[in-house]
Image (cartoon, grey):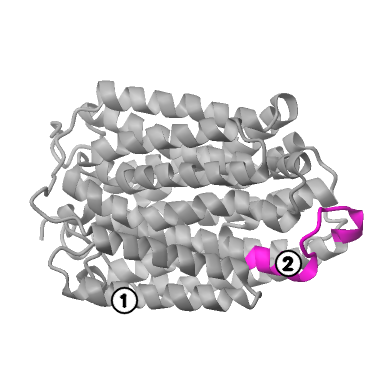
């Protein structure tokens, strides 16, 4: 383990900077690729003649693969070592990006996004636990704020740089950028990161449980995306049955993939994850809808649309470190609940947008969203990680990531359902613009309601600062 200064030191120990650099670079790359792809969707749809509903699968495929693999990877990282899995994840991500640059059809591109999602899951489930394993307890919120700022910086630069690259170099250049980023992260990890993982190799990895969990989650979430088609009921029924069987099996397994005691006896852990689920269910698809709105309805090119969409994540990137530091002193439930209230307000205001809405109004709404996200994300992560023992860091981070990814999937499913109802599976043209506007209004109202509901889960989680430094050494 790296040496650190006494816990009362105000500065971040120099020895952990390589770990912070590697995890921060990785935390930047994945959201950058996600947001840059969003701005490139109309160009992708034009090249491969993909309808507006199917375009959603370019984003959804990544989320579905990532959500289904987060928990198994988190458990595997606790057993075998986080650094090893973190490096493997970057290599898988690079493979998926390479395949995407060579895509000759929409189907091939979607498959490459699945591979990228698997790599992203390995990174998501190990980055934060690796970072927190070398950070003093009283600085956890601070480094989480830095890490979260990197996520939002990736989201910020995605629309701008992604718009530039798409306009002047084509959408495939986005994945070339991803390859370069993965290579850099891998180099820093292998050459600079020197940590000793707290591995538990004597514990058994529940391979059967992992397979049941992954297939059940994929089946369930795929069923959600098929709504309102009748076939969705078969998928949802099969997935729900698999999830129930998985939970019953985990309760009787000596070395479970998911220790259900984390939920039964830990209110803060449970409700913080529920809050993340509701928040991301309501907020994730906002950028997807606005990308379509700004380019199809307002007639902007990808670069100009990206410059507008950057308003939200740039506010997040600037304010997240401050929110993280505040969560070391102020109860995370207060900060996170305030953030969710602002998020619900911003999305509700976006529901009023129409063909004549000025750009300053959209930018103002996005800035409100950025402030809300900043106040929610790092304090909520701090609450989750503070509520578990050190040996559960991998599973805790993966569980939070899974709830977050399921929320993102649910958000996209809501939007795809609404688009299917008001627009249908057609290539976008001016005759369908009115249906797109109506889809936006309906989706934003639903999303605002979901974010508002998350406030109550956040407030009910209780305090974490009155239980000692943290719970990791219990």
**Viewer-side residue, 26 vs 147:** 26
Q: Is residue 280 left or right of residue 213?
A: right
- The image shows residue 65 at horizontal and vertical percentages of 46, 52
Does the magenta run of residues contain 195? no
Q: Is residue 157 visible?
A: yes
Q: Give the residue displayed 36% in from the left and 59% down from the top.
A: 400
Tell me the element at label 1.
Answer: helix
Magenta residue span = 414-433
**Viewer-side residue, 180 vs 274:** 180
Q: CA distance from mark 1 to mark 2?
A: 32 Å
Q: Could you tell me which quadrant the N terminus lies in? A: top left
- The image shows residue 262 at horizontal and vertical percentages of 23, 68
Q: Give the residue displayed 82% in from the left and 49% down from the top.
A: 296
- The image shows residue 302 at horizontal and vertical percentages of 74, 37
Alpha-carbon neighbours of circle 1 within 10 Å: few (<14), some, or many (≥20)? some
Work out whether mark 1 precedes mark 2 in sequence or the reverse, and give the earlier one. 1
Magenta span main SS: helix
Q: Is residue 380 visible?
A: no
Alpha-carbon neighbours of circle 2 within 10 Å: few (<14), some, or many (≥20)? many
Q: Which residue is mark 1?
A: 245
Res 440 → quadrant:
bottom right
Q: Which residue is mark 2?
A: 420
**Viewer-side residue, 51 vs 177:** 51
Q: Which numbered disc covers residue 377?
A: none
- The image shows residue 315 at horizontal and vertical percentages of 56, 44
Res 421 → quadrant:
bottom right
């Amino acid at each position: 383990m790296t040496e650190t200064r006494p816990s009362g030191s105000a500065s971040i120990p120099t020895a952990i900077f390589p770990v912070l650099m590697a995890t921060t670079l990785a935390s930047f790359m994945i959201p950058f690729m996600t947001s840059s792809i969003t701005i490139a969707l109309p160009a992708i749809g034009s090249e491969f003649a993909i309808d507006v509903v199917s375009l959603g699968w370019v984003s959804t495929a990544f989320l579905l693969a990532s959500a289904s693999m987060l928990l198994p990877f988190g458990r595997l990282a606790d057993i075998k070592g986080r650094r090893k899995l973190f490096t493997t994840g970057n290599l898988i991500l690079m493979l998926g990006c390479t395949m995407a640059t060579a895509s000759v059809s929409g189907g091939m591109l979607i498959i490459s996004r699945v591979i990228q999602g698997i790599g992203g899951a390995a990174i998501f489930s190990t980055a934060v636990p690796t970072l927190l394993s070398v950070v003093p307890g009283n600085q956890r919120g601070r480094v989480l704020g830095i890490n979260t700022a990197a996520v939002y910086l990736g989201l910020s630069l995605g629309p701008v740089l992604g718009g530039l690259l798409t306009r002047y170099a084509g959408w495939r250049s986005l994945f070339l950028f991803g390859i370069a980023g993965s290579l850099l992260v891998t180099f820093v990890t292998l050459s600079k990161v020197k940590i000793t993982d707290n591995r538990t190799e004597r514990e058994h990895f529940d391979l059967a449980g992992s397979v049941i969990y992954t297939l059940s989650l994929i089946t369930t979430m795929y069923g959600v995306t098929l709504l309102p088609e009748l076939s969705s009921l078969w998928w949802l029924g099969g997935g729900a049955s698999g999830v129930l069987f998985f939970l019953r099996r985990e309760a009787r397994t000596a070395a479970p993939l998911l220790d259900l005691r984390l939920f039964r006896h830990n209110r803060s852990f449970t409700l913080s994850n529920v809050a993340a689920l509701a928040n991301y269910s309501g907020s994730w698809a906002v950028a997807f809808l606005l990308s379509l709105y700004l380019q199809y309805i307002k007639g902007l090119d990808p670069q100009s649309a990206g410059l507008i969409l950057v308003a939200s994540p740039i506010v997040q990137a600037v304010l997240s470190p401050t929110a993280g530091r505040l969560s070391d002193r102020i109860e995370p439930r207060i900060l996170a609940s305030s953030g969710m209230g602002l998020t619900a307000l911003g999305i509700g205001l976006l529901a009023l947008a129409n063909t004549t809405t000025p750009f300053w109004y959209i930018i103002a709404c996005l800035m409100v969203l950025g402030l809300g996200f900043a106040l929610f994300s790092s304090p909520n992560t701090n609450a989750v990680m503070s509520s578990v023992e050190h040996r559960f860091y991998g599973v805790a981070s993966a569980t939070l990531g899974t709830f977050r990814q399921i929320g993102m999937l649910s958000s996209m499913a809501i939007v795809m359902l609404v688009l299917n109802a008001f627009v249908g599976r057609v290539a976008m043209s001016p005759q369908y613009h009115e249906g797109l506007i109506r889809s936006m209004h309906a989706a934003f109202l639903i999303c605002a309601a979901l974010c508002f509901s998350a406030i109550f889960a956040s407030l009910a989680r209780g305090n974490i600062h009155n239980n000692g430094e943290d719970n990791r050494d219990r």
